[in-house]
Amino acid sequence: MDRKAIGRKALGDLRRDAEAASAVQRHELLSILSGNKETEYGRRYGFSGIESVEAFQSMVPMTTYEDYQGYIDRMIAGERGVLTASDPVYYAITSGSTDTPKYVPVTERDMRVHLDFIHSGIMGMVDEYFASSCPDILSRKVFQVGEFARTALPSGVMCGVRSASLYQWLDRDGSFDASPFCVPKDVLFPDELEDLTYVKVRFALAERHLSSIHSVFLHRIVSALDYIRNNWSLLLRDMEMGDIDPAIQLSSRWRERLRTWLPPDPERAVELRALRIDEDASDMIRRIWPEMRYLIAIGGRSFPVYEEAIAYYGPDIPIHHFIYGASEGFLSIANGVGRSDEYILIPAAGFFEFIPAEGGGRPLVVGELEKGGRYELVFTNHSGLYRYRMRDVLEVVGFLGETPVIRFCYRVNQMLNVADEKVDSEQLGTAMRLFSERMGIPQPRFCFDEDFSERPGRYIAYIEGKKLYDADRVLDECLSHASYGYSGCRLMGDISMPHVRFLPEGTFRRYEDGVASTGRAMAQYKPAMMLRKDEMRSFLAAEAGRWEKEEGL
């Protein structure tokens, strides 16, 4: 079956399941329980005697990761039949807020859902979007910003970030076809984690016929484009000479490979040099790659600064916003090309329950939700998580058949809470949008922290850019507008005036570069709105202090 046929089938299957989502959901639940009834977990909670959703909800408790820690440790040590009858083929290492890694098992069934409904579904959506204007869109080259490092547990079972799992699994016997990508297979599947931005950018610049750029998050694409813009002369000089500048931090192994793969190309260097990207980077994506058609990456209202950057680097280039998901499950797909903050829950991904965000109450199921309603998601997957509280609050923005189309609102356990005001990431995003509008500036990169060094406590906002007059007062007004809880606590004197500390441009990028240099995979790194790590807190405080001294603040 060719790629277009695969995409059409994926969309057809998704739409068929969406029309009968309630029945599909019940089937998925009973199939999961039946298949795992003889596992230790299945016997403990009587899976063999469960024949309805109501019985499932009464007999099986809701869970968090801590409920599985011991089970998963035993599975990694080699025990079988603990959570699932099928052995995991991958362990996703979470990108959580603590320094202790968490391992989430992934079975082949979940890999199939990812392949059949998300990977193939995106191809179908792209093909439909460009059917009349660019019918051969799927045959062009792809610039894959991320990588799929070959990592495994001592037992040999693959592991790593969840976003790399499908490609590692597809290449488990070495048969993955890397020809659609602009880099050699060795660059897509490095033996160990290393910053290969320079390598990937060199290949991308050498390729005249790129049609798309793929990543997990939009900020990775923006970072690659920033890298091209900031190193334009160096990159073209290296392209012309077929060499690697000594200033580039790259191992000798990759230097030798790159010299072999990319011989001198003075003709392409002349073409690109005429664009003067270092002087004017507007619309640089299509100026460098005239055949560029679309991007794949998670963006939307949670990442406004990167949406603005793409609007500058590639105005009018549509984005497929990939998925809403997590290490615990890739369970949705964006509702078409150019549709941000709209994700179709995949009925075959597992079994969904929804706790009303206001007032709690009985968990609801597909078929019982209302448009505009907000719910905390509870998920039962094919890989051994049962009634797992994702801690994500979602809003239903519409329906595809019976299937909810949702947007992510905020994490239940990620809030600023100085005086029981409970300000979440969505409210912080709203406050910063208002702040940028009132200050007349593009929305900057920012991060908030709680400060209890004085009484009452207050918020500290770290914001990139030069000092702005009256910033503390304006931010206070914006936070009060965005959060009723914050406003009430301010009126009662329970929270002090917030304080804005300004940072040099590029501070957050330098921090991320430092994290990457330690070997951490950045494919699933999420820019933080709230400080939760002491190392980042110390870094930002030091940078703010240096900037304040230099600026005489």
Image: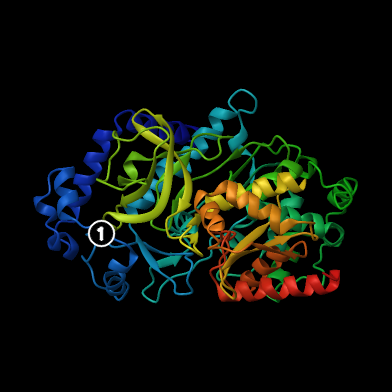
User: What is the x, y in percent for residue 130?
Assistant: 60, 29
Left or right position of 105 against 275? left
Q: Quadrant of the C terminus?
A: bottom right
Is 505 rendered above or below residue 101? above
Q: Quadrant of the N terminus?
A: top left
User: What is the x, y in percent for residue 203?
Assistant: 71, 55
Quadrant of the image occupied by residue 79: bottom left
User: What is the x, y in percent for residue 434?
Assistant: 66, 45
Furthest residue toward top? 132
Q: Which residue is mark 1?
A: 86
**Residue at image x 53%, y 55%?**
486
Left or right position of 345 against 362? right
* Residue 247 seen by the camera: no
Q: Nearer the viewer, residue 8 or 443?
A: 443
Secondary structure of residue under mark 1: loop
Left or right position of 275 against 403? right
**Residue at image x 42%, y 56%?**
412
